[in-house]
Image (cartoon, rainbow, N blue to C red):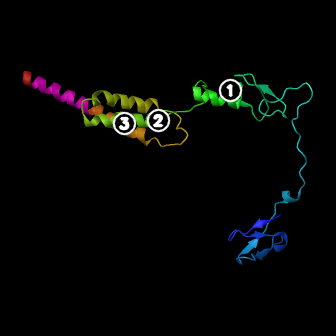
Amino acid sequence: MTVACSKCGSILLDGEGGAGEWRDCSNCGSAIRLRLFPAYHRTVAPTRTEATLEGESSCFFHPHKRAVVPCDECGRFLCALCRVEFGARNICPGCIDSGMKKGNLAAVETTRRRFDSIALAVAALPSLLIWPTLFTGPVAIYLSVQHWNDPPGILPRGRWRLVVAFVIGIAQVTAWIGLFVYLFTLRNQLLL
């Protein structure tokens, strides 16, 4: 067994440090303590191989291993290592790769819409032109409420975009309602 010094990286030999004792590295002089797990001294029993017997099917990808299931897409026999479960189906790695490229595997999610960013863009960008906010304010509110419980995605993000989009949408709808009420009362005053 060889152990490297954590400071300088030089190789320490068995005789240079006993288990549990502090020793100095012969190269840099730093104090090193060697501890071995009890499992290091145990002998490992040989593992059972899944070799195929006469009359049994072998894995398409590993001919020396026994097949356990066929691929539900292409019919290739798969060992326990190659078998990938998608719900109730067993699919081989080749079919997963081709299915992801073709986009016909429903269980594999390759993209996700970020409705929090969409809602924020729908609420904020039309504010520059004013009149589109008549339509985008309610859409921003709808998107914020509808997609509040959507899964966050591979990289989790906070829901602050949905909150900001909702607040901007409410402000836009309130402003339009206030404008319509003001114009309606102004019209009534002019008619009198």
Give the total of numbered labels: 3
Q: Residue at x 38, y 37 (%)?
A: 120
Cα gap from disc 3 to disc 1, whole angstroms:
36 Å
Segment colored magenta: 175-189
Q: Residue at label 2?
A: 114
Q: Is label 2 in a helix, a strand or a loop?
A: loop
Nearest to the observer: residue 141 or residue 117: 117
184 shown above or below 9 = above
Q: Residue at label 3?
A: 121
Q: Residue at x 17, y 29 (%)?
A: 182
Residue 23 appears in the figure: yes
What's the residue type where badge 1 is placed? Gly
At label 1, counting other C-alpha atoms closer than 10 Å, the crowd grade (few under 14, some 14-19, many 20 or more) is: few
Q: Is residue 176 magenta?
A: yes
Q: Main secondary structure of the magenta part?
A: helix
157 shown above or below 149 = below
Cα gap from disc 1 to disc 2, whole angstroms:
26 Å
Q: Residue at label 1?
A: 87
Left or right of 180: which side holds 172? right
